[in-house]
Amino acid sequence: MSEAPRKPKSMFRYYDPERDKRDKAVILAHDEAMTRGEARCLVRTVDGELFSYKKEEIGFVTGGPGPKIASGPGMLVGGTLFWLATLALGIFAFIDQGPTPGERTGMYFVTAFLAAGGWYFMHLGLAEHRARKLRKARGVPKPSLQAPLHLP
């Protein structure tokens, strides 16, 4: 009784000739779609397979260093917190009579900054929500945007 060789679990990428063949087939299909004028991106899925996504199917990029919000609902919660802070500081800036004109200008600047952050978080959250709905409707796998793309 012989057992199939087990793949070692490691953070390093091991050479897999079958994966390279699948990647080359996806790259050819991707190039054909690009020549037809479709806007597409080559991204690995959460399973590690290469896939050609349309721009609207990706959502937002979660890669990069440091802690991050990786879901659409998380972005919407972050955006809501930004908008609540914007509202609180805006009300304080209009009601409070103590600040000097320079301090009041600073509060308006911070309020505008918080509003821009709230808009950006909401924009990213809604983009991820739309992309998740599109992927589900089309049967497209979820992209993995944390790891760099290594093409053959």
Image (cartoon, rainbow, N blue to C red):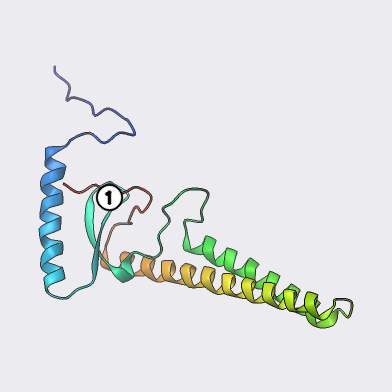
Would residue 125 appear left or right of 92 to someone viewing this image? left
Q: Residue at x 31, y 65 (%)?
A: 135
- Of the 4 image quadrants, the one containing the N terminus is top left
- The x and y percentages for residue 115 are 62, 75
- Residue labelled with disc 1: 149
- The x and y percentages for residue 70 are 47, 56
Q: Residue at x 42, y 66 (%)?
A: 128
Q: Residue at x 17, y 25 (%)?
A: 4
Would residue 17 appear left or right of 149 to someone viewing this image? left
What is the number of callouts on the image?
Answer: 1
The extreme right residue here reads 98
Picture quadrant of residue 15: top left
Q: Which kind of residue does numbered mark 1 sit on? A: Leu
The extreme top residue here reads 1
Would residue 77 appear left or right of 84 to someone viewing this image? left
- The x and y percentages for residue 81 are 64, 66
Q: Residue at x 73, y 74 (%)?
A: 106
Crowding around mark 1 (Cα neighbors within 10 Å: few <14, some 14 to 19, many 20+) is few
Q: Is residue 101 above or below residue 25?
A: below
Identify the secondary structure beneath mark 1.
Answer: loop
- The x and y percentages for residue 118 are 58, 71
Q: Is residue 18 above or below residue 38?
A: above
Q: Is residue 83 above or below residue 60?
A: below
